[in-house]
Amino acid sequence: MAGNSFGSLFRLTTFGESHGRALGGIIDGCPAGIVLDQDAIQQELNRRRPGQSSIVTQRKEADTVEIYSGTFEGKTTGTPIGFAIHNTNQKSKDYGHIKDSYRPSHADYVYDQKYGFRDYRGGGRSSARETASRVVAGAIAKQFLKDVRINAFVSQVGELKLEKNYQELDFNQIEKNAVRCADPEMAALMEDYIKAVKKEGDTIGGVITCVAQNVPVGLGEPVFDKLHAELGKAMLSINAVKGFEYGSGFAGVAMKGSSHNDQFNADGSTKTNLSGGVQGGISNGMDIYFNVAFKPVATVLQAYDTIDKEGNKVTTQGKGRHDPCVVPRAVPIVEAMTALVLADYSLLARTNKI
């Protein structure tokens, strides 16, 4: 299986399955001399960890990261950083009923067709649990980026949509509620809605908004490696993501160019930021902001029709521990992938300077 690595100079390769012994990764290209705060790395994992509230999967995992190489006396050495997160609370028997059948809208069928074999326990490599490794790498990338601030938050659950501009919000509110919405009142409505959907044995989708501030001018490698293109690839590689838009996004099509253009200030900043901090595929120093759409979790705890390996129609039902809505736990994943892109492009920018 190819496609397990992300990045060019700051490069992450991940390994492991949902119900295997461990997940982990190797980070290649992280510069030497970066002071690593391991507590901060663990805190990022804690934000993604299952079982943290009543509106997420109740799988109980400590998700403690162990770093095996690439550091000495609290600093990076410039050599590959190897780490692992051990699985401790697998319940593989919860998936025995789908050993010979395919769950709708999962990777079951295509994995079987492509590889002739699949790990049916929690989806194996296709499970969203793989993203734990990304969060570790993203936490390290954040520490390399230093002054860059990356904040993601839930801006929509189902039809409940936060209409405020991100500049009107207090990012300090994000970690004060289970939904990770930057608006307390909307967070309460979203939480009640997710609980109601969960009670029905169903799931619901949502949107995460991410804002990267203090990003320097000049990140991005045209023509095929534009910054927004790489951010789009990073987000679309996350499980359950169905859409990505940055800046004015799809709403921009209703505007005229005279209104959509970001007029310059004398210092090179712009009066508006409909470009979303990226022009010509290169960061312009303004805030980078984008939205990531997540579909409803495919596993529903209701009876459903499907097919087995022989093409026979069968009826089965979802079992086990699953998120009724993925976006609360996906917030740190979106931040992590953003940090990985910005760290990689920061190193690429260094190579372009004479």
Image (cartoon, rainbow, N blue to C red):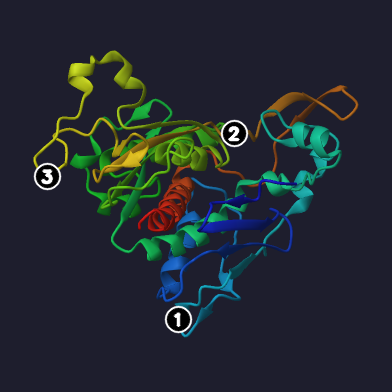
Q: Residues within 10 Å of mark 3 (few under 14, many from 20)?
A: few
Please report whichever mark, 1 or 3, sits nearer to the chain's N-terminal start: 1
Residue 208 image-quadrant placement? top left
Amino acid type, mark 2:
Gly
Please report whichever mark, 2 or 1, sits nearer to the chain's N-terminal start: 1
Marks 2 and 1 close (CB-CB < 8 Å):
no
Amino acid type, mark 3:
Asp
Q: Identify the residue at horizontal 78%, vertical 44% (top origin).
A: 120
Amino acid type, mark 1:
Gly
Q: Residues within 10 Å of mark 1 (few under 14, many from 20)?
A: few
Give the answer, above or below, for where 266 lies relative to 89: above
Query: Element at badge 1?
Result: loop
Residue designated by label 2: 201
Query: Element at badge 2?
Result: loop
Give the answer, above or below, for where 226 lies relative to 161: below
Residue 323 x/y as whole percent? 56, 43
Residue designated by label 3: 267
Give the answer, above or below, for where 144 lies relative to 329: below
Residue designated by label 1: 74
Quadrant (top left/top right/bottom left/bottom right) for the C terminus: bottom left
